[in-house]
Image: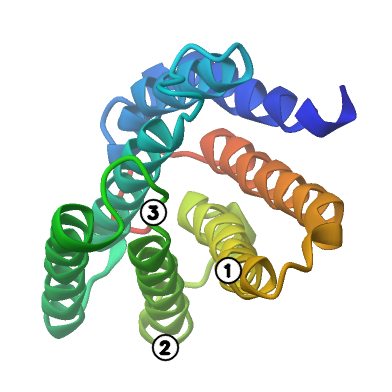
Amino acid sequence: MLDQLYLFFEALAFIVSVIQLPRLKNTAYKYFAPYLLFILVYEFGTINRWFGINGSNLWAANITLFIFFLFYSLFLRRLIKTPVFKKWVSAAILLSVFCSIINNIFFQGFFKLDSATILLQFAILVIITCVYFYELMNYTHVHLSIVSLPGFWLNTGLLFFCLVNFLIYASFAFLAYQQLMEFNLLFTIVANLAIAILYSCLTVSFLCARKVNSLL
């Protein structure tokens, strides 16, 4: 059961996003409720083996991680204020989509984990979150507490999650090649901790939400 404790944090984030919908309806955060519902369906489906084809659900993982990237990258793009940064983010998103299509068609295939593109997508999300923090530190002229900003908590959780998963995916590929699989348990614990931190930060961001979205 402990290896599924992360489900509590995902469910909590979903419940809070639904409760906060009246305050979120005039912001882009309103899209989190249906997205988190999708994530919960995927998680429960994975546990109960709803998506298995020939003993593998990697195709579902590919789709879910692709949607994860699109959702968060497009959401973060809304938070970026500098036009040139927005253009770079848009170009990076398009590049990742193109690479994912090419990789699925010509290289790793749809029914194998799209690890190369997943690494690229995590790297892009890390860069976008860093751009957000750069803008927050340099271009915010209003005196406020950054810990009261939903965007601060969202980007904090996402930065940690993406950094951890980037390292996990990169290390796992190397260790699998070297046939050093005794680190599986450690990877699972660290990955679940990263999920718990991400969704805890999301929960706080929903609780911090305001109807004014200029500083979100």
Q: Quadrant of residue 28?
A: top left
Residue drawn at 66 percent across, 45 percent down: 195
Residue drawn at 43 percent across, 61 percent down: 115
> Could you say where residue 58 lies in the image, as x and y percent from the top left?
44, 37
Of tags 3 and 1, the one toward the viewer is: 1
Q: Is residue 145 visible?
A: no
Residue hosting label 3: 216
**Quadrant position of the N terminus in the picture:** top right
Mark 2 → mark 3, Cα distance in angstroms: 15 Å
Identity, as a three-letter code, of the amino acid under mark 3: Leu
Residue hosting label 2: 138
Identity, as a three-letter code, of the amino acid under mark 1: Ala
Q: Quadrant of residue 71?
A: top left
Q: Earlier in the sequence, mark 3 or mark 1?
A: 1
In this rendering, would 41 be left or right of 100? Answer: right
Disc 1 crowd, CA 10 A, few/some/many (<14, 14-19, 20+): few
Q: Secondary structure at mark 1?
A: helix
Q: Secondary structure at mark 2?
A: helix
Q: What colour scheme was applied to this rendering of the protein?
A: rainbow
Residue hosting label 1: 173
Residue drawn at 52 percent across, 35 percent down: 206
Q: Secondary structure at mark 3?
A: loop
Task: Report if the CB atoms under discs 2 and 3 are less than 8 Å apart.
Answer: no
* Up/down of 142 relative to 51, above or below: below
Of tags 2 and 1, the one toward the viewer is: 1
